[in-house]
């Protein structure tokens, strides 16, 4: 079987990674790729190592020719295309924020604009390691945010095991490479601004990924305190490292919760005691790595790392596409044993 | 008046900065500079922009020819030279860890070795903005650690104002450029290891600077909870950014504590609301910058930044030297108005 | 005496450096600074370490209030303001390309547009170490291009000494940090594009600085062959290193030409044999450094380094301003001895 | 068929890449890997993304258990092990310099020491795109140097086509990431030394790779002038870009020489006119990319890029291993079509 897919927004960093993965995927054919700024060009002109692929505008995309579309578009521009595709029977993996929040009112609150297609909500949230039943065979999947993936992998096992101190703040100090800010030129991500610098932004209760993080955690444990989320911009191109400070009621149970949650997961590396997770564990791979450090009887420090463009976006989208079409979840990401 | 000084350990990163500052200082003459590995060479051979200065071994240093020495030596090697200098009536600014802890037993616990000169302890702790009376005219001063400086500037005003929640953990997520690890070649600080990477180390309750941080904070408020300290290695050469999560009993009083503590301080920039401190605020300057963000009613996030080699080491040593000799504290660091 | 100056285009990388130098200059007061994009803001909002300075639009600049203006503007926008200033008796240091070429036809050829103020040409070319007589007391000076400065410092002594092989190509392989490309956001200078990359551009006979390089060299020796100029974009923020391959008729005379040309120059470091010039010799200083390596009897390799924003732009402009007003040439750049 | 191999020197940068490629190679099994400094540990302790592989000392390596060995050892330590392996009928790909030069006297001249196993010389030089007949079924192959690969790919087609100007110097301005300097800690490759810096070294006629470059070129055209070779250290981890200035007798024939030489080569990308080769074309791939720019009638500029650890070392070794065992040359590097 070959699944025919279209990729919207192929010339951004996530789009480029996604096309690269999909063109090498043994069961997928990329039927088209869109770009509004580069329609008429070849993807190679956007990236020296890109596959040879013509770019068309979204308006010209032959939706009837594909089984699924993957949307690497800005929020508000993504949901209308998702709706259009679903109406034609084409499945959707949406990498934007548009389908992640169950409640359009929450979307309006965080994104400052009415949801462009509220009738689509809620959609299954595509973080397979936290629950893949709802993803198998799904018509559409909301691909998680990059920061949200790294934080949820660190906190969801604890929430599920009910070992977090009720009501206590969950402090997340997160750091991301600059590709997370996208490929559209902006002054603060120029090389000469970032080189030699390191800077926090939107710290405390301000970053939009808080909404999806708290939505998922609340689904596991309704007694949790607020997440305090402090992102920082790293002078590197890719990777997210989140240092998570979790007040726990039972340290042994907390550590066991990770082993229980991630046993047998091919894309999660739970590091042995004494080894701390670093970006070098995961950059350019579809994996996450997690390390656990007991700082005191009641405080567990989880370091959670992913490649923001892969497990934080493109490779997780491939996991979701695979689940959608009942393929091995890691097809196109790791060698699949017979 | 010209103060004649000797610098021990001039070819490390801190030593180089210190010599650079002292040779440009209007009231100081560098009489000698030592290096065990480069004795017989000129400092220019260690660093293209260094001043023209011959290097001698510590054993050959003419102690009788100077008014003060500044020690950029590894711990355990520093205190014996401090003792020797003091015995000859030469004043000492010690940039190593040897004179920072009041209690030799605490030193033995954190450094794993008996203190080399316990009779020298306690010494005044040279963080002028937290108290400069004990530093004026002092015979010897313990220059603070780089991480300790950034953390204490963020937490001491709160401790002094008694607005920290008693017993609650004080979470410090710190990030440092690689010059903090010194100039002796080690694999983990090779360019090809650090480029594209970001890595935590010694997180929780493991880093040696915890001892001096808690010693100073306990002197301000005996009810404080433990400091949880998580350092990370940044892919940049210099700068420390500490993101400090402080549970406070009174948010307004907490914010006022900083204004009260740092009013009129020429080297502390308390940033206006809405502006977050970044490394770019301070690298290659003798300044610290601090920003305050209220994350919730009870949690204040302080971002504290310094250049680890300057306010975290060399320029703070110059402040201390100035205080010792009753010079304007910022002489040699900022223009001194008439 | 205090010279009152205005800086046009203060929020670009060159403008920021220039304002920083001029505000610390003992004989200069910055009366105004312009920015079209940030008029109404303070320069501090553009750069954390900037001096406190309000920004106005060029149209609102009080030309009658200043003795001189320094123009950090794009080409074609600079010359009209230069003309306007000169008409009012205000002196001009122009850091754009507009006043560098003697012949408006050559300008039109390289810049693809008619010269905006041909009546101003020719202007004295402000590379003081190659001739400062024409600069002393000048009404206007054309500040050289950054690449041109590094190349001319390497080749002009040889041309002047008539030791270059007539007609032979002069190969220049140059490398620049990204601040040379300006602060206006463009995709190819985003951090995630430059990090881990290194790329040539406009190589051979394509780069605009060729025009001013060849104009100056031809003024020294009319028999020279073409300059082959290959710039590359370095993954660093600042600095230019030009590796220059010069076929010479007499190796000993060639090496002596440098000693003769730069004897006593306070801002030129001619390195001793065996030491090669690197960016670390000059970044964040107003200096150039040069090293000479004999590759064979007839081929001299000159490595020439500068900080593109300083000796390649802002600090050279200060040299020119000082010459213009008969101040010590290094005032505001190095300590001036009494 | 499965080829059993041993890798000597597995914990250096080249060794790590080689093990990574070989463990994923469909026809190869890594039977053992050696490291003197890390014997007894697992390769994972050397590199977070390494395969799970125990490390032994070279003395303990079971040579009788393998079909071939790949040697990532320092020069002088490699040849004796090559001799030992060959004596037991085990084939050898030597990634050191020991087997590259035909004449032991030339080796002694450049490496300053007598050749450790002159009876092995000459060996076939393993740059497949310049001649793979001598490599098919070979008992031993000398894997080229990284710089040499990038330079020879640029100059050999011209030498073979006899279009280089006889006797004229061939100027090569080369730039390499720091992994080319190895993983043994040295001060000049510390992160804080390289960050923000760019530096030439061993320029002119001093670098050891000149010997193998000129040996190969002389085999193609005995009339050539000297190669002038100027390497520079780039602030990035991997990749080599060589900018080559070739005086040619016939520009059209020169450009056709590349098309003729590399037609159908799966690992050589000859870029279309107007596109310049950059590190981004090749890093983390087994490919080389070349761009041609005519600077004048008689001067062709070739930009040649490779990943120093892959086409410059490990992936080229895999090409050579494949040729040795009559496998598809790109097996384990690119998908092999049926």
Image (cartoon, coloured by chain):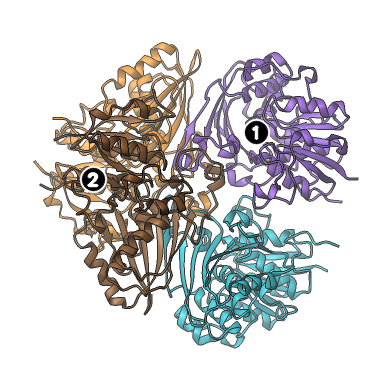
Chain colours: A cyan, B brown, C orange, D purple
Say which residue label 1 marks.
D146
Tell me if residue D227 comes above or below residue B14 in the rendering.
above
Q: Nearer the viewer, residue A231 or C207?
A: A231
Residue at the front extreme of this rendering? B119
Residue D87 occupies which quadrant of the picture?
A: top right
User: For the residue labelled by badge 1, is the local secondary structure a helix, a strand or a loop?
Assistant: helix
**Mark toward the viewer: 2 or 1:** 1
Q: Chain of mark 1?
A: D
- Left or right of residue C7: residue D23: right
Residue C208: % across, % down: 41, 39
State the residue at coordinates (41%, 57%): B211
Residue A252: % across, % down: 62, 72
Residue A138 visible in the current orientation: yes
Q: Residues within 10 Å of mark 2 (few under 14, many from 20)?
A: many
User: For the residue labelled by badge 2, is the local secondary structure a helix, a strand or a loop?
Assistant: strand
- Left or right of residue D159: residue C173: left
Tell me if residue D322 comes above or below residue D124 in the rendering.
below
Say which residue label 2 marks.
C70
Q: Nearer the viewer, residue B223 or A205?
A: B223
Q: Nearer the viewer, residue A243 or D322?
A: A243
Whether discs 2 and 1 lie on one chain: the answer is no
Residue D175: % across, % down: 55, 35
Q: Residues within 10 Å of mark 1 (few under 14, many from 20)?
A: many
Q: CA distance from mark 2 to mark 1?
A: 48 Å
- Left or right of residue C169: residue D308: right
- Are the two marked residues, 2 and 1, in contact with CB atoms closer than 8 angstroms? no
**How many numbered marks, from 0 up?**
2
Tell me if residue C327 comes above or below residue C296 in the rendering.
below
Residue A39: % across, % down: 59, 62
Residue C184 visible in the current orientation: no
């Amino acid at each position: 079987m070959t699944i025919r897919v279209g990729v919207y927004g192929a010339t951004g960093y996530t789009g480029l990674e996604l096309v690269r993965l999909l063109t090498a995927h043994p069961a997928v054919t990329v039927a088209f790729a869109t770009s509004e700024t580069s329609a008429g060009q070849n993807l190679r002109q956007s990236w020296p190592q890109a596959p040879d692929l013509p770019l068309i505008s979204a308006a010209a995309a032959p939706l009837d020719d594909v089984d699924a579309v993957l949307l690497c578009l800005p929020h508000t521009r993504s949901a209308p295309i998702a709706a259009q595709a679903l109406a034609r029977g084409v499945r959707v993996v949406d990498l934007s924020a548009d389908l992640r929040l169950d409640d359009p009112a929450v979307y309006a609150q965080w994104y400052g604009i009415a949801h462009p297609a509220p009738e689509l909500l809620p959609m299954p949230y595509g973080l397979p390691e936290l629950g893949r039943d709802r993803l198998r065979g799904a018509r559409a999947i909301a691909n998680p945010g990059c920061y949200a993936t790294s934080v949820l992998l660190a906190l969801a096992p604890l929430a599920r095991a009910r070992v977090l101190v009720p009501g206590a703040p969950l402090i997340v100090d997160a750091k991301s490479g600059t590709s997370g800010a996208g490929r559209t030129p902006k002054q603060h991500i120029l090389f000469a601004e970032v080189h030699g610098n390191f800077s926090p932004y939107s710290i405390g209760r301000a970053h939009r990924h808080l909404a999806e993080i708290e939505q998922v955690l609340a689904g596991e444990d309704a007694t949790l305190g607020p997440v305090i989320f402090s992102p920082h911009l790293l002078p590197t191109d890719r990777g997210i490292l989140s240092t998570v400070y979790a007040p726990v009621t039972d340290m042994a149970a907390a550590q066991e919760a990770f082993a229980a949650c991630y046993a047998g997961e091919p894309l999660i590396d739970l590091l042995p005691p004494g080894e701390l997770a670093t970006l070098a564990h995961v950059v350019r791979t579809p994996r996450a790595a997690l390390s656990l450090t007991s700082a005191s009887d009641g405080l567990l420090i989880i370091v959670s790392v992913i490649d923001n463009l892969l497990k934080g976006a493109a490779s997780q989208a491939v996991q979701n596409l695979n689940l959608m079409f009942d393929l091995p979840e890691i097809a196109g990401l790791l060698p699949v044993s017979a």
